[in-house]
């Protein structure tokens, strides 16, 4: 399984994150891992310079939540799925009613049948 280790400089709740790709490695899933919060063992000198990952086989982006040194050059990294980036195309193409926006802080349409001038 391939894993791309990256650096993310954006806030966690932002949908279009600024990601700098670092390196691509091969790893293996630990027993009882899952797609949402996998634990992966990798060979690398120092994974702590990365805070973000992408696994093409799962088609998901992840926050790196923990680094565990198993022995010299062997690390276990624990990941947590970044739902906003992983499903951003579906989210951005959804038709929704917005109460607040990032640019203005509010929208003239409110929940229900209210309209604000």
Image (cartoon, rainbow, N blue to C red):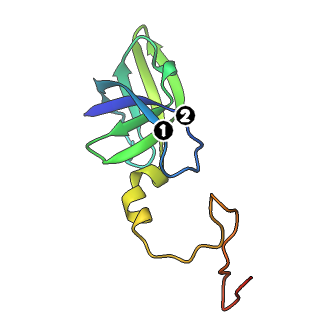
Exactly how many numbered labels are in the figure?
2
Q: Nearer the viewer, residue 16 or 13?
A: 16
Q: Position of residue 6 (x, y in %)?
A: 42, 29
> Which element type, helix, strand or loop, lies under badge 1?
loop
User: Quadrant location of residue 4?
Assistant: top left
Question: Which residue does the numbered mark 1 point to in the structure image?
Answer: 18
Q: Nearer the viewer, residue 54 or 103?
A: 103
Question: Which residue does the numbered mark 2 point to in the structure image?
Answer: 9
Residue furthest toward the right? 117
Could you tell whether 109 is left or right of 31 in the image?
A: right
Q: Position of residue 102 (x, y in %)?
A: 62, 58
Mark 1 and mark 2 in contact? Answer it, CB < 8 Å.
Answer: yes
Q: Position of residue 23 (x, y in %)?
A: 34, 23
> Which element type, helix, strand or loop, lies under badge 2?
loop
Gap between marks 1 and 2 measured at Cα: 6 Å
Sequence-first disc among 1 and 2: 2
Q: Is residue 34 above or below residue 24?
A: below
Q: Is residue 13 above or below residue 31?
A: below
User: Quadrant location of residue 19?
Assistant: top left
Q: Nearer the viewer, residue 114 or 117?
A: 117
Could you tell whether 88 is left or right of 13 in the image?
A: left
Q: Is residue 64 above or below residue 15?
A: above
Q: Is residue 43 above or below residue 72?
A: below
Classify 10 Å Cα crowding around label 2: few (below 14), some (14-19), many (20 and above).
Answer: few
Q: Position of residue 27 (x, y in %)?
A: 30, 27
Q: Residue at x 70, y 63 (%)?
A: 105
Instruction: Say which quadrant the C terminus sits in.
Output: bottom right
């Amino acid at each position: 399984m391939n894993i791309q280790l990256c650096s993310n400089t954006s806030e966690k709740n932002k949908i279009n994150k600024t990601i700098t790709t670092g390196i691509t490695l091969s790893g293996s899933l630990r027993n009882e891992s899952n797609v949402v919060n996998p634990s992966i063992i990798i060979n690398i000198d120092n994974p702590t310079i990365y805070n973000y990952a992408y696994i093409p086989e799962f088609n998901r982006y992840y926050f790196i939540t923990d680094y565990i040194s198993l022995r010299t050059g062997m690390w276990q990294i624990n990941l947590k799925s970044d739902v906003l980036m992983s499903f951003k195309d579906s989210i951005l193409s959804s038709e929704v009613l917005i109460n607040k926006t990032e640019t203005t802080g509010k929208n003239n349409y409110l929940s229900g049948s209210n309209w604000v001038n």
